[in-house]
Amino acid sequence: MPGDHDMGAYPEPPRQTPAVDKQTALPNPELILSKLFYYSVDLPVTTFRDAIDNIRSRNKLVYYHQKFRRVPDLTDCQEGDYVCYYEAEMQWRRDYKVDQEIVKVIQERLKACQQREGNSYQQNCAKEIQQFNEVTKNYLSRYGDLGAYANGRKCLMKQKERMMAAQAQSA
Amino acid sequence: MVGMSVLRSAAAFAARLSPLKSGNNAVNLLTRTIPRTDKVAVRWGHGKKMFIVRPSDFYDRRFLNLLQYYILLTGIPVAVLITCVNIFIGEAELAETPEDYEPEHWEYYKHPITRWIARNMYDSPVKDYEKMMAAIQIEKEKADMRLTQLEVRRHMRQKGDGPWFQVPTLNKELIDNSYKSSPDN
């Protein structure tokens, strides 16, 4: 299981709870409930997890991130060189997956920001919102309506259409 | 007494002949005790046992029992195996690839069972890639050869001086030209 999220990446605003100023002799129910939760749920779960981690730490396995070499693109292939087409197609598919993950990360950031800020998210998360809009606009312009049977050639044709539209607009 | 036994045997014979007629119940005739319905002890412990008439659920219950048995026969060992793998051999952790170390293809997966499958049952993705490229290369060569064959065929048919499309004809030396020298024979 992954560790807890990086506290520095999504910094929480400084706490503004006032100092405890107890004026009654009655016990604090919040304290009672939190202690109850701790002893009944938190402690058993944590000890169980630690026990399992102890057992697991004897057979530690690692996995690595696979890096692929860049190969010539579809535009750099000779006509009729189907092997080159295949390699370019595979590279395009890997890039497509990477772009999808990038969009997901940006979405996660926006969602976390909105959850943090609550009702004032529209002004406090302006940077995240702007980033999200830009990233999704670019993603849609590149991979937008390609559909389920998308491949590198169709994406290239879409790019050609985009360039033609841009040229027609500028001319 | 003898008369009683004759009557009883006659009633038993009648019961044997027509057992469904009321009053011919052989049990009541053969036993000496007669149930006294006014002196039965009434207990409300479990209530009177009723035979509720409903269709047989034997086949349904048998099916469900067998289903449960055959599902759990392999289901429980698989569940135990997966639990043990998850507890004793945990999932892998992401690490930086050390310098000048080429990880094996199964070391790119997280779960130990996935790693095992990738190591023992699947070919490495590099090998799959190369297999696909080899197939594409073979098909490309076949297609090129077919195109050149069509081209060569076209040329040979047109020009006629190649080895293809040769029609065997008779030997020229077999023609008798002797009578052609004197036309007015």
Image (cartoon, helix red, strand yellow):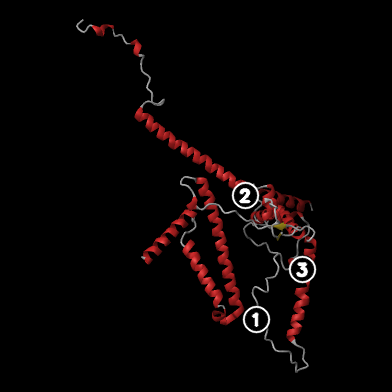
Give coordinates of residue A141: x percent, y percent.
Answer: 47, 64
Q: Residue at x 34, y 10 (%)?
A: B174
Please state which amino acid type lies under the numbered disc 3: Lys
What residue sits right under mark 1 in the picture? A13
Whether residues under marks 1 and 3 lie with C-beta atoms below 8 angstroms apart, the answer is no
Q: Quadrant of residue A55?
A: bottom right
Q: CA distance from mark 1 to mark 3?
A: 88 Å
Q: Residue at x 50, y 39 (%)?
A: B141
What residue sits right under mark 2 in the picture? B125
Which disc, if any, is residue B39?
A: 3
Q: Secondary structure at mark 3?
A: helix
Give the tally of numbered discs. 3
Q: Secondary structure at mark 2?
A: helix
Q: Residue at x 71, y 68 (%)?
A: A3
Chain under callout 3: B
Q: Circle 1: is it few (<14), some (14-19), or many (20+) Cα within 10 Å? A: few
Chain under callout 2: B
Against B134, is B53 above or below? below
Give coordinates of residue A168: x percent, y percent.
Answer: 37, 64
Tell me if B168 is positioned left or right of A93 in this view. Answer: left
